[in-house]
Amino acid sequence: MITLGIDPGFARCGYAFIEAKNSAYKIVDSGLIETFQNQEYNQRLSFIYTQLDELIKKYKPSNAAIEELFFSKNTKTAIKVAEARGVIILALTLNNIEFFEYKPKEVKSQITGNGNANKDAMMKMVNLFTGADIIQDDTADAVAIALAHASRNRIFNNIK
C-alpha cells in the first residue's frame, strides 16, 4: 500500500510516497514541488496542481495525509499556503484519493514521541524509519506525515 504525505506550501510543497509492508517503510519517491516569485500567482497554483496530479497518476497512492494549516504571524503567507492547500485537496479529490489531516504536533508525537520535537529530531527519526538520508526540511516533513499516517493506519487495521 502506498501512502502520499504532503507538507503543503506555496513556494515549496513537500511530497512523499511511502510503501508500508508490515512494519517496514520504504520511500518510493519524495521531493519538492517548487514555484518561483517571478511566476504569476495563478500560474504558481496551477503548477502545484499539475505536478501533484502527475505524481498521483504515476504512483497511484491508496490514501494520503496532509498537514493541517497552522496560522503564523504573517497573514499574507498563511493565505497563500491555504490556497495552495486547497489546490492540493482538489488534486486529491479529483483523483479519488481519500485523505486525512494531521496537526504538526500529532505528526511529531507519532514520529518522535514528543509533540514539541525540533526539526533535527524529526529528520533523524524519518531517516531512521526509512533508511534514507533526507536533508531538506519540507521533504522530511512530507515523509513524516506519510509515516505518521501509515503507522497509525497499520495499528488501527491490526486492532480491527
Image: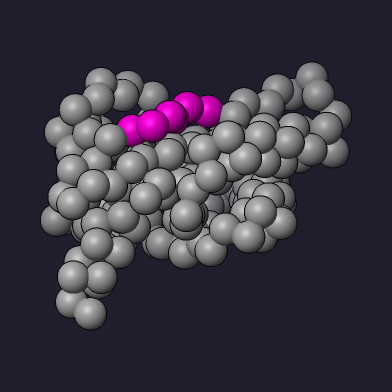
> Is residue 76 placed above or below 38 in the rendered structure?
below
Q: Residue at x 18, y 77 (%)?
A: 159
Residue 109 in sight from this viewpoint: yes
Q: Residue at x 24, y 62 (%)?
A: 154
Q: Which residues are magenta?
A: 27-32
Give whichever of 144, 3 is nearer the camera: 3
Picture coordinates of residue 6, whole percent (x, y)? 49, 45
Give whichever of 105, 30 is nearer the camera: 30
Picture coordinates of residue 140, whole percent (x, y)? 35, 34
Picture coordinates of residue 90, whole percent (x, y)? 70, 56
The C terminus: image quadrant = bottom left
> Is residue 91 placed above or below 140 in the rendered structure?
below
> Is residue 28 placed above or below 108 in the rendered structure?
above
Q: Residue at x 19, y 28 (%)?
A: 131
83 with respect to 1 (left or right): right
Task: Look at the image and name its color scheme.
Answer: one colour
The answer to whether residue 86 is magenta is: no
> Is residue 156 placed above or below 104 in the rendered structure?
below
